[in-house]
Amino acid sequence: MTPKTIFGRTAFLAAALALVLTAASEASAACDDPAGPQVDWSAGCSLSSVDLRKSNLTGANLSGALLSNALMEGVNLSGANMTDANLSGAILDGADLTGAKLDGANWTDGRVCAGGSLGFCE
């Protein structure tokens, strides 16, 4: 192989690797993303000091997220819209869910919350 061929193949592989890594990072959880519909705060995200009162978390991915701290003081999710959110495996110890809308949410134990679930999963 000539140096030109080797360089061309190396450049191509480097570009392909950069594209794959960029796509993978965009698809993974970003724990510092702002609250909003479809936000991905899944496994590994610790939200123990975040105030999420009245946030729109419709369709959010919170699977495996930590929503309480070492003192078991949870995140304030009172009045949040968590319709169709994924909470499977999330740690909610001490979280305030007063008035949180949980219609169709996947609960921490895998159940799907019934329509009209407000503050707790029915």
Image (cartoon, helix red, strand yellow):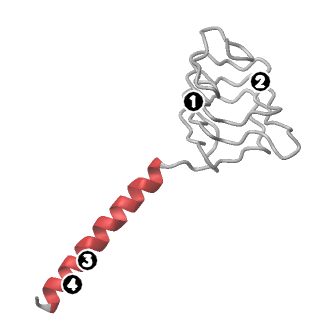
Secondary structure at numbered mark 2: loop
Which quadrant of the structure image shows residue 118? top right
Q: Which residue is mark 2?
A: 97
Report, in whole angstroms, how far the alpha carbon at label 1 lies from the one at label 4: 46 Å
Residue type, label 3: Ala
Report, in whole angstroms, how far the alpha carbon at label 3 lies from the one at label 4: 6 Å
Q: Which residue is mark 3?
A: 11
Residue type, label 2: Leu
Q: Residues within 10 Å of mark 4 (few under 14, many from 20)?
A: few
Q: Which residue is mark 4?
A: 7
Residue 50 on image: x %, y %: 76, 42
Relative to residue 77, is residue 116 depicted above or below?
A: above
Point out the image quarter for the C terminus. top right
Report, in whole angstroms, how far the alpha carbon at label 2 lies from the one at label 4: 57 Å
Secondary structure at numbered mark 1: loop
Relative to residue 17, is residue 72 depicted above or below?
A: above
